[in-house]
Image (tube, helix red, strand yellow):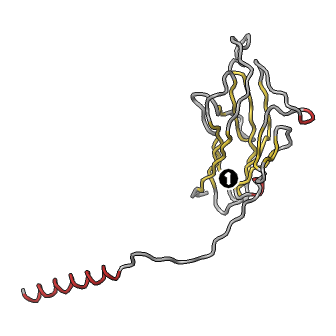
Amino acid sequence: MRRNLLLVVALLALSGLMAAMAVSEAQVRNKMSFSVVHTQDALIALEGGDHAAIKYGGSAKKLEIDFNVGYNGQSFGVQQDSKYTWNDLFKVTNNTEKPVKVTVELNPKTGAKGMRILAKTQGDSNWTQLTGNNGDVVTFYLWPGDHEWICMQLKDWDFDKEGGSTFNKKVSDYNFMLLVTAEAEDIIG
């Protein structure tokens, strides 16, 4: 009994000593680097197609899409009861070392009164509505070194109805943020 008691006391003392020796803080220095590059040269690269609507703005040369731009770089716009489609508007390239799940969406999802903004990948036949109460996202996967072209469409809410639009839409300017998100995925394939 006494031997067991001494063993328990010894173990408690040893665990107390180990706790006192535990690291409370450590600092280790290692090199790290990164470069800020133009959007078409990034790990997840965005590169515009051959459209007047595409430009690169700011010092970081970020991709900007302005659907109003047309002939000679002049600003025009779109009208009621219309549908405009831009095939291969921009492409997303995965320059990382891992497969990624990519989503394309708009923020905010509401605000284009009377018009729908839709998108799809180049090979897809189904359009995804990015705006409205049921605004969705386009989702696809890219292997390292692969790319996918994105097509976009502006379409009047009533375009598919016989007789066209049933109400007058206010002439307005609409602004959205295009969000392209890439998340590394463990894809078995």
- Towards the viewer: 62 or 100: 62
Question: Mark 1 sits on what residue?
Answer: 142
Q: Residue at x 64, y 31 (%)?
A: 131
Considering the numbered disc 1 on the image, is that residue within a helix, a strand or a loop?
A: strand
Measured as percent of width and height from the top left, residue 38 is found at 77, 55
Numbered marks: total: 1
> Picture quarter containing residue 108?
top right
Is 137 or 113 nearer to us in this picture? 113
Task: Work out whether 43 lies above or below 92.
Answer: below
Coordinates of residue 186 in the picture (x, y in percent): 57, 58
Q: Residues within 10 Å of mark 1 (few under 14, many from 20)?
A: many
Residue 106: % across, % down = 65, 38
Residue extending furthest toward the right? 72
- Does 49 sit above or below residue 163? below
Please state which of residues 127 and 66 is positioned toward the viewer in this rendering: 66
**Amino acid of disc 1:** Leu
* Image quarter in which the C terminus is found: bottom right
Q: Report the quarter where the N terminus lies.
A: bottom left
